[in-house]
Amino acid sequence: PPIEGLDLDTLVGELEEDLYELTNAAICSDIAFGQGVELPDTAYMVEVSMVLCSDKHIQDLNRRWRKKDAPTDVLSFPQMKTAAEAKAEENAPKLSSAVTTLGDLVISLETAKRQAQARGHSLRDELRVLAVHGLLHLLGHDHEGPEGAK
């Protein structure tokens, strides 16, 4: 369902610019610290898709993929192996494409709006926070379990 007072076309345009900047920053940070995904030497472009959806849709995905029957704010579906996974598979093939697909982000607009209101900032700022959170998951970072929570 549409969110009252939300200009979705403008928001999507702004998020496209934000996602470009955030992706570049996240990848540069991961490369600097030697963590996350292993990008091919020839990669000069990365691709990330983002879906903005309802609580019902994200709850369906959360139930199907994470066995959690509740809406959540963001889900990440990585398309690449993390550096740790690639090292574990010594003979794993590396991508050689000029465009590297990191994966998909799914963000609930309804949850993002509630969280933005609760935190006292704009919906766009909350979506940026959720995009960074999701990008970090696409790059192989995890906060589940005792080590990830740090």
Image (cartoon, rainbow, N blue to C red):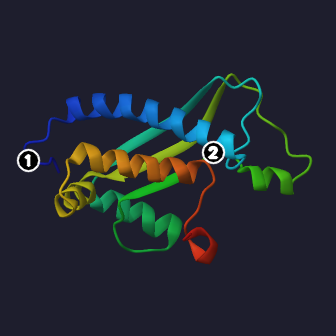
Tell me residue 69's x, y (percent).
39, 74
| Amino acid type of the residue that numbered disc 1 sits on in the rendered structure | Glu
Report the front residue among 148 and 53.
Answer: 148
Q: Residue furthest front?
A: 32
Q: What distance separates the C-alpha of mark 2 from that of mark 1?
A: 34 Å
Horizontal side of 72 relative to 26 (left or right) equals: left
Q: In the image, is residue 32 above or below residue 87?
A: above
Q: Earlier in the sequence, mark 2 or mark 1?
A: 1
Residue at left offset 43%, top offset 61% = 61
Extreme-bottom residue of the structure: 146
The residue under label 2 is 79
Q: Amino acid at mark 2?
A: Gln
Q: Under tag 1, what secondary structure? A: loop
Task: Give x and y (percent) for residue 104.
Answer: 50, 44
Q: Nearer the viewer, residue 60 or 31?
A: 31
Residue at coordinates 81% horizontally, 37% vertically from top-left?
A: 94
- Horizontal side, residue 97 vs residue 55: left or right: right
Side (left or right) of 114 relative to 75: left
Using the image, tell me which numbered label, if any, was put on residue 139. Answer: none
The residue sitting at 45% across, 31% down in the picture is 21
Instruction: Tell me where residue 44 appears, x and y as whole percent.
Output: 65, 22
| Mark 1, residue position | 4
- Identify the element where label 2 is drawn: loop
Q: Nearer the viewer, residue 8 or 22?
A: 22
Instruction: Place residue 47 in its image quadrant.
Output: top right
For image coordinates 54% across by 71% down, the residue present is 149
Q: Residues within 10 Å of mark 2 (few under 14, many from 20)?
A: some
